[in-house]
Amino acid sequence: MKASRLFLIHNDMCDKDHFEYTVDRFADLQLLRYRVNGFDDLSLRQKTLVYYLSEAALEGRDILFDQNGKYNLRIRRLLEAVYTGYQGDRATDGFRALEVYLKRVWFSNGIHHHYACDKFVPGFPETYLRELVDSVDVSCLPLEEGETVETMCGKLFPVIFDPSVMPKRVNQADGEDLVATSAANYYEGVTQKEAEDFYGEMKARGGDRPVMYGMNSRLVKEDGMLKEQVWKADGMYGPAIRKIVGWLEKAETVAENDTQRKVIRLLVEFYRTGSLKVFDEYSIEWLKDTASQVDFVNGFIESYGDPLGLKASWESIVNFKDMEATRRTETISVHAQWFEDHSPVDARFRKERVKGVSAKVITAAMLGGDLYPSTAIGINLPNSNWIRSVHGSKSVTIGNLIEAYNKAARGNGFREEFVAGEEEKVLLDKYADLTDSLHTDLHECLGHGSGKLLPGVDPDALKAYGSTIEEARADLFGLYYLPDAKLVELELTPDAEAYKAGYYSYMMNGLMTQLVRIEPGRDVEEAHMRNRQLIARWALEHGAADKVVELVRRDGKTCVRVNDYSRLRHLFGELLAEIQRIKSEGDLEAARQLVERYGVKVDPKLHKEVLARYKALNLAPYKGFVNPVYTAVRDGEGRITDVTVDYTEEYAGQMLRYSRDYSNL
């Protein structure tokens, strides 16, 4: 479970007091570099471990492309072939549009927007792409055995150009067959009901500690029978998984301790066998490893890309602990039971004993799969409900991305345009960096780990609404505690006023500014965005009689005004209690009504206004990252004597290198 917001970082090529952020800018995207602060202070063994794990993080890139859509890999390779092989005029509008389209495909790991899930519209016609295809060496094209250029184009061009073909990667529209109408490549020839029944029967036999059925497989219908194609070393995605395993085995030789070695061995066994029981064993051991400075995630983790919330996309992050910054998250973790005991939810839904909560601030060293180029700022794992209840969870906040984003965001005109008045600007300038980070910590460290399901409740009972409800639950937990005197007592906030910055920025984002990520006429689709709008609009409506929060006009522009911060906290507590009840009882109908009423629909007049105001600022609503490049320095006998890090690689160059060196499927 991850908090989804992206950040700017500074450029190592500059002196340490000067920041240059942007690597590339196109469409609605901005590409940035990030610095791996503290890498040079690691031991040679730790640097080598980061290097091996980073290679493993890159080997799975093709898996995510294929998971996001069954034609994505061929389309990417077709576009790369014409992009690199075309010898004509590359300064034309047509070629520039093709370059932008290819960059968007790279960024989103496929032909659908990474966040909104809608298919891109190319800025060039079919005839132009065919002209380019015909101009390059046919040996460079991704032709299947016995296929001609004509039949290849006949198969791929409708997927690229026809808006009615595979229009959404993940469809969440209420009342539709979400499997049949989603382009994600997790099912083939299967209806939503068939998939739900198939896994429902498995869960019924799973006991009180069920594995996450379906997590690492594609469900298909063959000869009228449902069958899982398991992602493992000798199964689907085998060539990529075997490469990942090879680097993990190297990483095991330089692990920091026995616990970490066991973690890596179990992950390798999972990749080889596809056993979800082994994955649970791996997850438990990973939770135990709190001593290692270097850590990583590598595998099939998050289910946001599956409309049913069952299948997990492949991702990886390599990181090491920021020792100084971790004090904040460790303080929160130590007092986890206090927060659980004082939660406003019904006592039936609270954990009597909070177990195994660990948290740290990390420095990201490498991003891969569903965490690259777009990434998260916080992660809380594992996602298994029974493991979380028995063994706890591990939370991380990605400090080197957050700090740089906050610095880079200053002075871009955003606050001046959207904040209601000077009082709110002063609050945000003084406290927003702190409260935003603290809210992320509370969300990840405590929110996702709080509460419990009642006996017999299916962890997937909320179906397509599960992700939104879970993110709302974690967000509300953090929001409820931001003003608490306990945070001042623990020296996590400086005074009783700081929380107001967090409340204001959250309400402004949920009611207005996140709308810059939605195309005109579209509904809110993504789970994190639905969650934020649900919370903000629910609070706006339920506090309307007392004008707790208002949408007001300032100089002819709509702004958010919070009139009663104390009352707003009370509203957040009320909603948290209800959402925890929904989660604990598995109340699907209540979840559906809450999400559909508050989280989905957009006010078209307000939306139009927000888009126009944001466009005038010339800002990109989405940001992502270019990875650093690690090079192993070896002696005459091939032994690694150092690992260097370089920050100079450009976006297109990195993407083409990854396609050349890590194309395994």
Image (tube, rainbow, N blue to C red):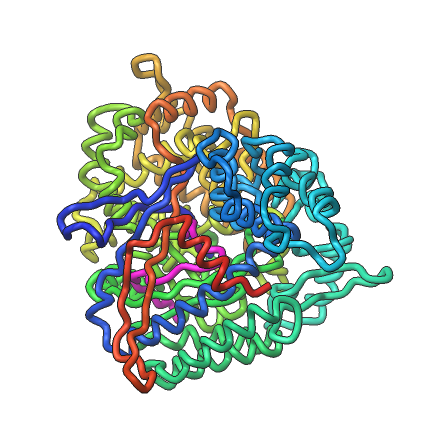
Which residue is depicted at the point 62% across and 60% down?
457
Predominant secondary structure in magenta? strand
- The mark tally for this picture is 0
For the record, the magenta segment spans 356-375
Camera-nearest residue between 341 and 134: 134
- Is the residue 315 above or below the residue 70 in the image? below
Q: Extreme top residue here?
A: 556
Answer left or right for 213 relative to 243. Answer: right
Camera-nearest residue between 512 and 609: 609
- Is the residue 39 above or below the residue 30 in the image? below
Q: Position of residue 101 (x, y in %)?
A: 51, 39
Which residue is depicted at the point 66% across and 33% down?
163
Q: Position of residue 103 (x, y in %)?
A: 47, 43
Camera-nearest residue between 613 and 331: 613
Answer left or right for 495 relative to 284. Answer: left
- Is the residue 334 above or below the residue 107 in the image? below
Which residue is depicted at the point 47% across and 30% down?
92
**Quadrant housing the C terminus:** bottom right
Residue 367 belongs to the span the image colors magenta? yes
- Is the residue 631 above or below the residue 613 in the image? below
Q: Position of residue 407 (x, y in %)?
A: 22, 43
Which residue is depicted at the point 40% across and 36% down?
621
Q: Position of residue 278 (x, y in %)?
A: 56, 78
